[in-house]
Structures are given as structure tokens and as C-alpha cells.
Amino acid sequence: MLVGGARLLEFFDHPECTRRVIDRDLAGLADFIRQKMDHSHVVVLASGDPLFFGIGSYLAKVLGPDRVKIHPNVSALAAAFARLRLPWHDAAFVSCHGRRGAGSLLRALAESAKVAVFTDPGHDPAWVARQALDAGYEHFSVWVLEQMGTAAEKIRRLTLHQASSMKFADPNMVILVQSDEPPCGRVPFLGMPDEFFLHRQGLITKADVRAVSLARLRIFPEAVVWDLGAGSGAVAIEAGALAHRGQVFAVEKDPRRLEQIEANCRRLKAANVTPVRAVMPAGLEELPAPDRVFVGGGGKRLPDILEKAALMTRPSAIVVVNTVLVSSLEATLAFFKGAGWKVEAVQVQVAHGRPLAGDLRFAGGNPVWIIQALKKAEEDEDGRQ
């Protein structure tokens, strides 16, 4: 029994044996192999290493690892970097096979100077280039490797703009390499200076307060985070760096500030931050349930916003509220204590050194209350649900 993709089976048309083409019905394929393997030799053809984005891991899982023998070859990734004579121990890799959206690709570009992309006909090199350009990654160049290992193999280095409108032969893969240092360095990171963000009239959670607030949120990599009253989006963008495998929703009612959030996300490569226009608490029910919620605004609607957010949170959720108003402090404490959450409040006041007469003086900023509310009185050590 010879099993494989149609392209690979063409190389083995000479043996006298029964063939089965691998298609989308993997469950049916596993049933077929299971029925035949006790009285026939079954060979499954896979390119490269079957355990690296290959069918080997699936078959070992469904058939049992003791019933499968793996013979690895050079993976497409190893072959591609060898062709380019580039080290790849520090590279990220993304598979677009059967996936939707560009989230994984953009996160990899934000975190690595070299990114390998396994393409498919619906996510070809032109699509990859357009996604990178739309997200502001002009500082990457692109290598496209077509039909590796065949007589028709072709390797081209292109700009993203060139690749975005071209056609390529299948199969192919893409290697994106950073050619220049991105603006602002490798961002985002925790406690970025306020001047890194576009903002109006100082309406931004200041860097030092932002760092303390994010620490109080205890964000984990897969978290869903809400930033309510997002303003410039500074908290949302830094939260996105912490929840790099999760999602962040920056909710803001002012359309001008929403434009700033969108611009800051593009500039700072915050691929997993989604700006949302809503007059809270309306619209929150349309968002995925959050693990973490930051509230930086709300005004007179603060109690209603807290009630709606608390109702939608997942188990072991944490809500952090920033306020400079005594009335908002009192309202927040009263709400969470009444809801049975564990509440803690701290006041943060930061003084920054300023030069004066050849010496240094410290100018104090406005004090800010940071209220942390935990949905359960006792939680896991890492704060995750």
C-alpha cells in the first residue's frame, strides 16, 4: 500500500501496488490505513520531516506511536535556509496551511528578524507580502523558493512591493528577513516612553503607572484582554506584547482617539490589538469574554461599565481600574466588594528628575489610584484560569 499526495505519488508510478491519495479526509485516511496495516505493508510518502508540520504526527497519534515508524529527511525549512546560506536557529516559522487570518504571521514578524512561512494556494507569497506591507513591515525583504528539489526550482529575492503583485509556481515557501532596524527598535515592550505613542493633550496612561497597572493585571500569553476607555491605546499595545498568543480589544468612543489607536498599532506592530468603537457599556457583549480587563476611563458610567465587564469575565479574571477621582475610587471599591471579589487599592505618585541650576530637582506627578479586583478569593499561583 502506497499512500501520499498526488505530486509525490507521481515519482513512484513504477511499483506494482495499491495507491491511496492523501486528501482533506484525514479521518478516512486513518481508517483506511488501520484496516490495511495488519495484513499489508503501508508506506506513507511525506516530503521532508514528517513530524515538522507533516502527517507523521497525526498518524502517530491516531494509529499509536508504536505502530508507526518515521524516516525523516531534510525538512523544507532546513533546505530553504541551506539554499540561502543563512543560519536559522533564531528564526520563527509559521504555517498558513488551512489557516485563516494573518495573526500568527504578524506576531512572528514583530518578534523575529527571520520568519519562514509555509504557504498554500490560498496564502501564497503575494498574500504574505501584502499582509506584511499592510501591517507596516516594509523593513523586511522576502525570499521566495519555488518547487524546491525539482528541475524547475527557482529562488528569488524580492521586495515586499514586488512580491505583492506577482504569481508563483506551487509548491513554494517564503523566508522574510529583516533588512533594516524597525522604527523605535524592537517594540512593543513594557513601559514604553509616552512619546512613542500618538496622543492628544496628555490623554495617555503614563509609562510608570502603565507598568504598575499591567503588572497588577498579571497577563499571560494566551489571555483575552479588554482595554476600556483606551485613549491612545498605550495600555492595549503593551498588553498585546504580554498576551502575544492572545487577543487585546481597545475600546474607545471618540473616533479621533480611535484613529490614534489604529495609527499606534501600525507604528508599533501591535498585530493582536483590535480597536473597537463603542459607547460603553453598549457593545461590550459583542466581544469575546475577557481574562483581564483594564479600565482607564468611564466617567459617570463607570459603575455600569464595571457591572457589564464583571458579568462577562471568565473564571479567575482580574480587573484593574485607574482613576484620579475619589468618587470613582469609592464607586469601584463598593462595586467589587459588593460582588464578592477580592479587592486591593494602591496609590502611585511618580516624581521625575529635572535639571535645575546644574543640579537635579524632582517634580511630582498627579497621584493615581490603581484598584485590582480578583474574581476569586483564592486563585492559581500564576493567576491563570
Image (spheres, rainbow, N blue to C red):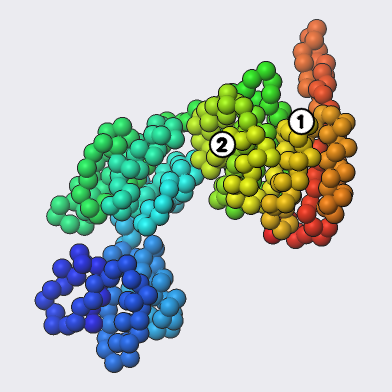
Quarter of the C terminus within the rendering = bottom right
Residue 266 percent location from the top left of the image: 50, 32
Point out the residue furthest to the bottom here.
39
Residue 345 point in image, percent of width and height = 86, 41
Relative vertical location of residue 75 with respect to residue 301 in this rendering, above or below: below
Q: Mark 2 falls on what kind of element?
A: strand
Which one is closest to the eye, mark 1 or mark 2? 1
Q: Amino acid at mark 2?
A: Pro
In the rendered view, does 196 fall on the left or right side of 359? left
Disc assigned to residue 275: 2
Q: Is 254 located above or below residue 132 in the figure?
A: above
Q: Residue at x 31, y 64 (%)?
A: 48
Q: Earlier in the sequence, mark 1 or mark 2?
A: 2
Q: Residues within 10 Å of mark 2 (few under 14, many from 20)?
A: many
CB atoms of marks 1 and 2 within 8 Å:
no
> Front-most of 239 and 183?
239
Query: Residue at label 1?
Result: 299
The extreme left residue here reads 14
Residue 257 in sight: yes
- Residues 271 and 353: in front is 271
Which amino acid, mark 1?
Answer: Gly
Relative horizontal placement of residue 38, taking residue 207 as reference (left or right): left
Rendered position, 367 above or below 245: above
Between the C-alphas of marks 1 and 2, the distance is 20 Å
The residue lying at 44 percent from left, 76 percent from top is: 61
Residue depicted at 22% across the width and 42% down the height: 167
Q: How many marks?
A: 2
Quadrant of res 298: top right
Quarter of image, res 348: top right
Query: In percent of the image, x 58 and y 34: which residue is there?
Result: 277
Tell me residue 10's x, y (percent).
15, 68
337 or 222, which is in the foreground? 337
